[in-house]
Amino acid sequence: MSSGLEQLYQQIILDHAKARHGSPLAAYDGDGRVGESHQLNPVCGDEITLRAAVLDGSVAAVTWDGAGCAISMASASVLADLVQGLPRDEAITLVDAFREVMRSRGRIEADEEVLGDAAAFSGVSRFPARVKCAMLAWVALEESLLAANG
Amino acid sequence: MPVIETPVTLTPSDAGLTDAEVHRIRNDFPILGTEVNGRPLVYLDSGATSQNPVSVMEAEQEFYEQRNAAVHRGAHSLAVDATDAYEDARAAVARFIGARTNELVWTSNATEGINLVAYAMSNASLGRGGDTARRFAVGPGDSIVVTELEHHANLIPWQELAARTGAELRFIPVDDAGALRLDEARQVITSSTRMVAFSHASNVLGTISPVAEIVGLAREVGALTLLDACQSVPHLPVDVKALDVDFLVFSGHKMLGPTGIGALYGRAELLNAMPPFLTGGSMITTVTMQGAEYLPSPNRFEAGTQRISQAVALGAAANYLAETGMERIEAWEATLGRRLVAGLEAIDGVRVLGPRADQPRIGLAAFDVDGVHAHDVGQFLDDQGIAVRVGHHCAQPLHRRLGLTATTRASTYLYTTTDEVDAFLAAVAQVRPFFGAE
């Protein structure tokens, strides 16, 4: 198989696709506000429901349920690890940074300092048909944080 | 690369085309000689769209270079030439399915053909077309019947017709294997049924529907029938009179033709009684400021400037298929289909949808790979130059019924070789190891 395929499916992605950190979706009974979002990729049927709790301006908990391809499930798992405990504003900045890389068609290499394990998804940006898979959980987080704010 | 041993062997008597002929045919299709991701293209997505032979592309180019003009209007020589080319193509495609020329209406694709009938019925339900169109009217107390395995194109137009008119939409269910439940059909198709619309060949399962039985049930209660022949007209001999259906639709791009052109067949007496769907120029006899009278079929359904070059090219495609021989294409694809299914079933963790290898099917197989999403399967195959379809194949209800959201589908055509099927099978065998599926 080609290096393109290995760039797309890095080991860290294959591992997260199975580990699914933050899954399943859990009820949040702590203090703070909770937002939830359901996202569907009609092209392939990838689906995610994500719940985020915000307490004192920080992300207190992220859990999710999903069904979909390795890219979408791994992306949700990495995201759940990354944003745990992050100030809400920084979480939103992180989503923007990830989106910029995903939309770059391979022109922007992810900054590992900023994106951590999510930098492994850089290769996805060269496969336009898969960008939506990688973005699904991130869009769900964005909406959840918005809902938790409201 | 692991070698897949399949129990299927080719014999000249059942193979239809020979390997040598298929290789000759491939020379007519320039795209089949290209590379994808540094590997020779293995195109197994003809169920979605087929590739075009040079003769089809040349027919379209020749039309633009030598005969381009508006059809059915203007008296200059070029307009006469263009009209001849357009109508010759209609005759070729009509002949290809055993229809009379005035029974073949050009549409953009099969989807538009189904919508045309559904909206014509809608218009009839509003009283358009007068007494002769009353047989197309539906309303509260009436029912429209489809099946659980339909492509969305043969489901949603009927859902919308039911919603607009107050008619009830019913469906013939499938069993756990995806076969139509004929025993249930008798309860579903009743005296209230006005239309029974169903697929000739399933785009997911590759199964051929029991057309005679379903048409028989519809006839018993006086219901109209519409056959979605998208996956049959390109792949096996189809004779609309033998099938005895009232309407039949198919798409050009799935039968070696260009995109943007398809056809609706309808029995002449029905088409001539049915109110139009799209209205405007070229479909009228007399127009006043108060109203208009319409031409007979097919012109009454072809409002506005038509897809002339595409129609001409589709005529060339029908001729190409007819010259190759539909019986032989059908036999070749049946051989490939058996090889596909037997090969897939031999791979650990792979489940083929629909009938087993020894059951009749067109050369198409959709399958689930345990522990690996279809999108990832498709990506892995694409890396090896193998093009397949992934997703729900526009049949969400059928997938839901079979407990799946997305599957991978390989579909063959007259230009598919046994080597390509084997390369595909070898690649599928590598999928679960690559993704570490247990």
Image (cartoon, grey):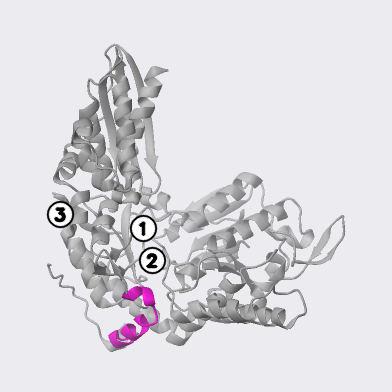
User: What residue is rendered at 77% in x and 79% in y?
Assistant: B75
Give the labeled residue for mark 1: B178
Amino acid type assigned to the residue bearing label 3 in the image:
Phe
Q: Earlier in the sequence, mark 3 or mark 1?
A: 1
**Secondary structure found at label 3:** helix
Q: Look at the image and give the residue range highlighted in magenta.
A: B18-33
Query: What is the spatial separation of the Cα atoms under label 3 and label 1, in whole angstroms?
Result: 30 Å
Q: Which mark is residue B319?
A: none
Residue A72's spot in the image, x, y percent? 28, 41
**Secondary structure found at label 2:** loop
User: What residue is rendered at 64% in x and 72% in y?
Assistant: B267
Residue B20's spot in the image, x, y percent? 29, 87
Tag 1 subunit = B
Q: How many marks?
A: 3
Give the labeled residue for mark 3: B434
Residue B27 counted in the magenta span = yes
Tag 3 subunit = B
Q: Are marks 3 and 1 on the same chain?
A: yes
Query: What is the spatial separation of the Cα atoms under label 2 and label 1, in whole angstroms?
Result: 9 Å
Amino acid type assigned to the residue bearing label 2 in the image:
Thr
User: What residue is rendered at 71% in x and 63% in y?
Assistant: B274
Give the labeled residue for mark 2: B207
